[in-house]
Image: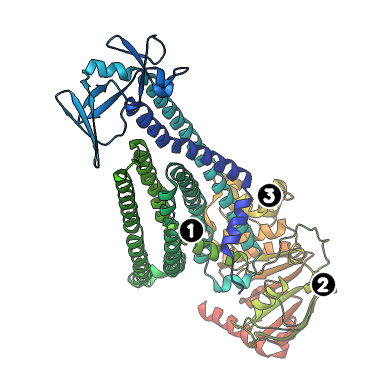
Amino acid sequence: MKKVKAGKRLFNYALTQRKTIIIALIMLSIAVAAELTGPFIAKRMIDNHILGIEKTWIASEEAGKDRVLYQGTYYIREDRAENIQLEEEETARILQVGREYYFVPSDISFDGERKVSNGELVITRGEQQASYEAELLTNSELITFYQPEVKYIIYLVALYFGLLVVASFFQYGQSYYLQTSANRIIQKMREDVFGQIQQLPIQYFDHLPAGKVVSRITNDTETIKELYVTVLATFFSGLIYITGIYIALFLLDAKLAAICLLLIPILIVWFILYRRYASVYNHKIRALLSDINGNINESIQGMTIIQAFRRQKKAKQEFETWNEEHFSYQNKLLSLNALTSHNLVGVLRNIAFVVVIWYFGGASLGIGSMISLGVLYAFVDYLGRMFGPITGMVNQLANLEQARVSAVRVFELMDEAGVKVADEKYPRYEGNVSFESVSFGYKEDEYVLKDISFDAKKGETVALVGHTGSGKSSIMNLLFRFYDIEKGKILIDGEDIQQLSKQAIRQHMGIVLQDPFLFSGTIASNVSLEDPSIAMDKVKKALEDVGAMDFISALPKGLEEPVIEKGSTLSSGQRQLISFARALAFDPAILILDEATASIDTETEAVIQKALEVLKKGRTTFIIAHRLSTIKNADQILVLDRGEIVERGNHAELMKLKGRYYQMYELQQGSKGLAG
């Protein structure tokens, strides 16, 4: 089978919701931009307003905005002074020494290590030293110098709070839209998978248990849903977040930001190595989960046999074997995740912080290259924030790999060759059926039908009899085109059925099985199968014609009586009568009765025989029967043995022949006599 390109297919599914996803990503980008503005605001608050008090102050004789009165003179910070020439006015500095602040009535030529002794401030940098007159500021005087900064700090705090509100709003929006689009994508995927199942040939289900099919539709698609809801949202937001952080880091310090870029190739290599090992475990885990589902489904279906033959312990042991193996591989995956997730992120975070401390520490010691505290704070803040999305992405690697494996399994099912369901209306055919030298085998070169030829005219009843494995049901499977023939031809009204679509052939065929299948719903819905062309009057008449209304009238809700899974609250005879009514309501040209009376008691059989006569009227009918007494009136009886027709004729002709049919009939009659 051609390898499924799961990634491309998942992307194509995502494109079905591209408008919603684009809106979500735009909202995510706005939210990230708003949130990442925070450290820049903090940097400005620290450098310009908290530490900004140490900037040069210019004396002024006039009061005004941002001016501070100290010892009878107004002062304004140099960066806020307008139309004041520095050389014409007196300058001053406020410098922090330890926990105290000092007023220096002049500018300083350089900055460095500060000490105060006897009202004198000494600044030392290397071999340079300078002394300045200094006055200790009281708390109230210090607060006076800080007073102009309060409004700016309040403004920045309000701006930061406003940006957080904006970020929260857009975070909610992107989460809502991403999850909505993810649910829509999975809804479409499940519809496509279920639609594909309707198109698959019957032989596909011969090799894949129902539990495994269910696992692919439910468990695997649910895992893929996590990809769109959680994994992609985490990776999208993480990538946008990291991109935004790197932009901010380059704005703060390009050299150190370039060093931090080394994290990217490390993460990429890490992701590749993780996928290589996790893929093996995830494939095995998903396969084992399918096996477990298949085992559970089989156990539930066969619970009667399990309990009747006291096989509970054996069934439990089989389940525990699957479960233990599943547990073993889950543990291996958990070990891999534990080894590579938080541990590696922690190591990378610590290395990054060591680099930052080394870099900024070295820079602060260099002459004339001191880094501001605001820049240091912002850089450390951004670096700390960057490992949040990295951790998130690493923690989603397991889900990403599980989703990828599940996608491969789902797309393998969707890539199986199927037949597109057509809505074409095909005119009702007469019902003349011809088999011309038909040979067929379920396995290559192992024929179960060999050179079968016969004709069934419109309105005739043809009975197929023979021991188990003689090929009776295979003939019906070929007529319905559940399987296609290998040699010969099957004609309906002279037209080769291979040239018709399967839906066209089956449009005017009906079938009643030995164990009739009823769907969850009501009795009425099981007759009409929700076909809008079959009105309630037609449903009621079909049930009356087959003699089913006697027991239905006694039910509390009549035609609307609920039918639970497989109709388990109804008797075999009641279920059979409902399936007869279903076939009658659809008015088929060709009717197939596959051992329809095999499991019915004698009293019910009499009712069903009457129903059969109603059902067969005007139709070409094929009956597969073990009870030969039910086919005595058949127009033609075909006796099969090992895939070949060994006798043919009506009941009287075959009894005269005294061959295989005669022996089978006499044996059944003798058994009845002995039983009586």
The residue sitting at 37% across, 9% down in the picture is 61
Mark 2 and mark 3: span between their CA atoms? 30 Å
Quarter of the figure with the N terminus: bottom right
- Whether residue 599 sits left or right of residue 618 in the image: it is left
Any part of residue 433 in sight: no
Residue at 40% x, 49% y: name it. Answer: 256
Which of the marked residues, 1 or 2, is nearer the chain's N terminus? 1
- Which quadrant would residue 43 be assigned to in this image? top left
For mark 2, what is the residue? 432
Q: Which mark is residue 540?
A: 3
Question: In the structure shown, which secondary structural element does the residue marked by tag 1 occupy?
Answer: helix
Residue placed furthest toward the left: 118
User: Which residue is labeled 1 in the image?
Assistant: 219
Q: Is residue 173 visible in the rendered structure shown here?
A: yes
At x 27% / y 27%, what residue is drawn? 95
* Residue at the outermost right position: 494
The picture places residue 162, in percent across and down from the top left corner, at 45, 27
Q: Is residue 57 above or below residue 31?
A: above
Ranked by sequence position, the earlier of labels 2 and 3 is 2
Q: Nearer the viewer, residue 93 or 465?
A: 93
Q: Nearer the viewer, mark 1 or mark 3?
A: 1
Give the CA separation, mark 1 to mark 3: 40 Å
Mark 2 or 3: in front is: 2
Amino acid type at image mark 3: Lys
**Amino acid type for the residue under numbered disc 1:** Asn
How packed is label 3: few (under 14 Cα within 10 Å), some, or many (20 or more)?
A: some
The three-letter amino acid code for the residue at tag 2 is Asn
Q: Are marks 1 and 3 in contact (CB under 8 Å)?
A: no
The number of callouts visible is 3
* Residue 394 rendering spot, x and y as whole percentages: 41, 56
